[in-house]
Amino acid sequence: MIGHWTRGAMASGLGLAATLLLVVAGCGGQGEQVDEAVVETDAGGGGGGVASAPGAVGTIKGRVIWGSADIPAPKPLDNKSKDPEVCGKAQLFSRNLVVDPETKGVMDLFAYIPKATAKNDAAVKALVKEMPEVEIDQKNCEYQPFATVMHKDQKLLFKSGDPVMHNVHYSGLENNRNFAVAPNTSVTQSMVKELNPVPLKCDVHPWMSGWIMVFDHPYFALTKADGSFEIKDVPAGTQNLVIRSGKMGYVTKGAAKGMPVTVEADKTTDLGDITFEPAAGKARK
C-alpha cells in the first residue's frame, strides 16, 4: 500500500521540523499524495547520543521473562464475599504478577519511551483513527483487560457486562474519578497524560483491580502472555525505554528515566530476553 517517503526539512526556532509526504504510486507511474506527517525533533529529549535524520523511525521489540526457576503460584482472591451468585461462579486470581509456566513470560507490563527525541503526529493520527475508543469491561466481577494503555486523544469506554452494580474508581494524580456503572450500560471518559500507572478498582467488589497508563505520544505497548512486546514508529537514535509493572515497580534499569536503546531507521532493535527480578528490583539481559 505504501510506496515511498518524500522528506523536506525546514528550520523552526530551536527545533527542527521535517514534513513527510506519504506517496503511493499510481497506475501510470505518477505519485499520488495521500497523507502528510510532521515530525518535530526535540533538542532536549530522550537519551541523546546517536542522532538521526528527522522523520526516520524504527522498531523496538523484546521479551520479559521471569528471573527464577520457581514460577509464582496464582494468588486466589476472595471473590465470593459480595454478589456470590454472579461473582463467585469461578475462582478469581490476582493478576498483578502473571507468569506463563511454559515460556516464563511476564504479562501485562507497561513498555514505553518516557520522553522521545521526536514526536510523530501522523502516527498519533493513525492510532486514534484505527481505535478511537479503548474499552474496559466489567465482566464476571473483574476488569477485562487488567492493564490498559492508551493515548490521551483516545476515549476510554467503561462497560459493565454483569447483571450487578459496579463502580469505577481510578485514582491517579491527573486522572481521578469515581462513578457508578449500572448493569449492561457504559460510561465514556476523557483522560489526560499521566506519568505513572493509574490504579483502578471497584469499591463495591474490593478484589476488582486494574491499571491504566495514558500517554501523549504513540510509543507504548503491553507485554503479551509470553512476555513479548513491540513498539513501532520510534524515532531513530538513542531513546530511553521503560518497562514497569503497575504494582511491582520498574523492571528496566534507570527507574523513571529508563535504559538507553539505540534505534536504527527502518530496522528492528531486538533486545532479546529481559529478566524480571522483582525481589532484587532490577532487570538484566
Image: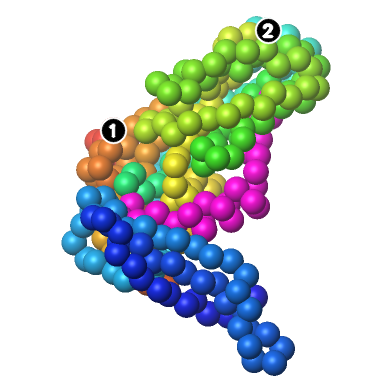
Q: Residue at x 61, y 17 (%)?
A: 168
Q: Is residue 193 rendered to the left or right of residue 150?
A: left
Quarter in which the N terminus is drawn: bottom right
Q: Which numbered tag is attached to residue 80?
A: none
Relative to 260, is 77 above or below?
above
In the image, residue 119 lies in the stretch drawn in magenta: yes
| Image marks 1 and 2: residues in contact by CB distance under 8 Å | no
Relative to 62, is 156 above or below?
above
> Which quarter of the figure has residue 137?
top right
> Which quarter of the figure has residue 270?
bottom left
Q: At which x and y percent is residue 185?
A: 78, 22
Q: Secondary structure at mark 2?
A: loop
**Along the line of sight, which residue is nearer the eye, 156 or 7?**
7
For label 1, the crowd category at 10 Å Cα-Cα, with few meaning under 14, some 14 to 19 and many 20 or more, is few
Q: Is residue 240 visible?
A: yes
Q: Amino acid at mark 1?
A: Ala
Relative to 285, is 164 above or below?
above
> Mark 1 — residue?
279
Q: Amino acid at mark 2?
A: Lys
Q: Residue at x 44, y 67 (%)?
A: 19
> Which quarter of the figure has residue 126?
bottom right
Q: Earlier in the sequence, mark 1 or mark 2?
A: 2
Q: Which numbered tag is attached to residue 82?
A: 2
For label 2, the crowd category at 10 Å Cα-Cα, with few meaning under 14, some 14 to 19 and many 20 or more, is some
Q: Residue at x 69, y 92 (%)?
A: 28
Per the model, the C-alpha gap separating discs 1 and 2 is: 33 Å
**Along the line of sight, which residue is nearer the eye, 128 or 64?**
128
Which segment did they paint magenta? 116-138
Q: Secondary structure at mark 1?
A: loop
